[in-house]
Image (cartoon, helix red, strand yellow):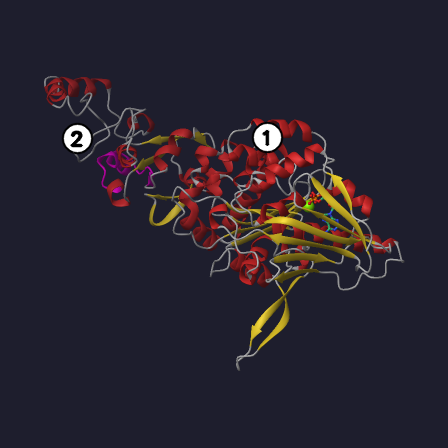
Amino acid sequence: SSSVETLEFQAETRQLLQLVIHSIYSNKDIFLRELISNASDALDKLRLESLTDSALAETTDLHISLEVDKPARTLTVRDNGIGMTRDDLVEVIGTIAKSGTAGLLEKLKESKDNATEAGLIGQFGVGFYSAFMVADKVTLRTRRAGTDSGTQWESDGEGTYALQAVDGLPVGTSVTLHLKPADSEDGLADYLSESKIRQIVKRYSDFIRWPIRMAAERTDADGGSSRETDTLNSMKALWARPRSEVTEEEYNDFYQQTGHDWLPPAATIHMRAEGTFEYEALLFIPSQAPFDLFSRETKPGVQLYVKRVFIMDDCEALMPQYLRFVKGVVDAHDLSLNVSREILQHDRQIAGVRRRLVKKVLGAIKDMQSKDAERYAKVWAQFGRVLKEGLLEDTDNTETLLGLLSAASTHDPEKTTTLREYVERMKDGQDAIYYLTGETRAMVENSPHMEAFAAKGYEVLILTDPVDEVWVDRVPAFDGHRLQSVAKGQVDLAESADDGKETDADRTRREQDFADLLPWLTSTLSEHVKEVRLSSRLTTSAACVVGDAHDVTPTLEKMYRAMGQ
Ligand code: ADP
Ligand code: MG
């Protein structure tokens, strides 16, 4: 073979390599995702070019293969894609062409902690260089489609790389990693292990559209062994297919496999956005809430992909906390593979995607409400408590959320009611939507506060979720009717009902009857109450405790105490 040429990395590349080698990423497994993603891009490019260039005949059986050589301690990622010329190699592997690199590297040098580093580095991505996280030497051999000569590139990731012409290479690229020893403390797994490789591919590259193959050792029943080639990825990017071509069964299978649920989803949302920021979304509303829905650690269940490459689970930037039960995938076309959570949180386009997805999810529940009441009732029973958190977090959608809300009510002990239905039943002259919060339905129903309302035939909503204590104070009105607790402040029923109205004279007489008792009660009970006053709220009970209009309710007090506040 020909002579070896040693070249220096560009200064910035050298700095970046140092950062990579001295591990910015705690998750080293992603090197394989990066190399597979490059191989997949190379296959895409060859296919595209072959459409217009008939000279590129070798476009059958495009695939990626992974090869393990245990004695040599190497892992090779091979593709039969577009390949690179010698000049391509110098240009794209030896240099960082991306603008703003210098400034970013300055910031990186100043940054003290790993999290900031990871956030910064995510802004342009390490790509190919991530190979040096797991390898102390990388050998790349490549031949550009349509050319005769191949090139070998080799480096230990320090200051230089070696280039050499090589004859007889197939079209495409192979990247051979001379692996560092496994070191769990350093996050370095045994990347020679077949099962580890399978696991990484399944997790990060399952939906790559080209087959990822690996020769696997098989033990037969009689103890002999043979080698067979397996395809490791399913290649199913269901979300990328047109809706009309996907069956309900396929959607359900996909959800149950990826969402680890044994029940089919209650609703499936599949959409594609075109224009300046393209993405596909495939979202599911589960039929059943997970057991840990209310644990502090539960994160939104939406995965982010970039052009079929898995980027992250639990992408908070795409789904608000109160829709954390929604599962699925968003595949954005115009993001960097190394985009970080920090960047996503501040990205205006991502914020736009999130707004749209929220509308879609709430719209799907609303649809159910009008078209499939039974299914809606089930979904509300499972997720209503969480959806009500939206009334605290998401003021943009207050109207929609109030429209979705169902609550128990004194109207019908068997059924819940929506606010719309409540409003339709409101009595003439009733201007507020009455409710009472409490720990259980029985406690609320037996509350002395209810008596006057029951006597007047006014419907009262029975709110027993802890979150009810909070949202009722945040939401001013529904459809122009304010929400009014029957247990807070002065509720003047006499004024709004025409029968049994107390005259001023009656009231003065009543007040005189109690003139001595009230101050005595107030001072005797001073440790427990602020004031004892006459009430028109009660019909059969002698007394009840009423909160000030802005007091914390007893249930909320308990909730705060339970939270240690
Ligand atoms: P990115 O993929 O974001 O461009 P990388 O560092 O992963 O960044 O790769 C740099 C470049 O090297 C790619 O854009 C591509 O031109 C080239 N390259 C890397 N791997 C391959 C491959 N397997 N086949 C062809 N070209 C490759
Ligand atoms: Mg890449």
Where's the N terminus, which quadrant? bottom right
Q: Image check: 473 left or right of 403?
A: left
Circle 1 is placed at which residue position?
108
Q: Is residue 160 left or right of residue 145?
A: left
According to the picture, the residue beneath numbered tag 2 turns out to be: 543
Residue at disc 1, secondary structure: helix
The correct choice, above or below, for 194 with respect to 547 in the image is below
Question: Magenta span covers which residues?
Answer: 445-463
Q: Residues within 10 Å of mark 1 (few under 14, many from 20)?
A: many
Tag 2: amino acid:
Ala
Q: Nearer the viewer, residue 514 or 212?
A: 212
Residue at the extreme front = 3
Three-letter code, disc 1: Leu
| Vertical relation: 550 (above or below) 278 | above
The picture quadrant where one finds residue 516 is: top left
* Label 2 SS: loop
Q: Quadrant of the C terminus?
A: top left
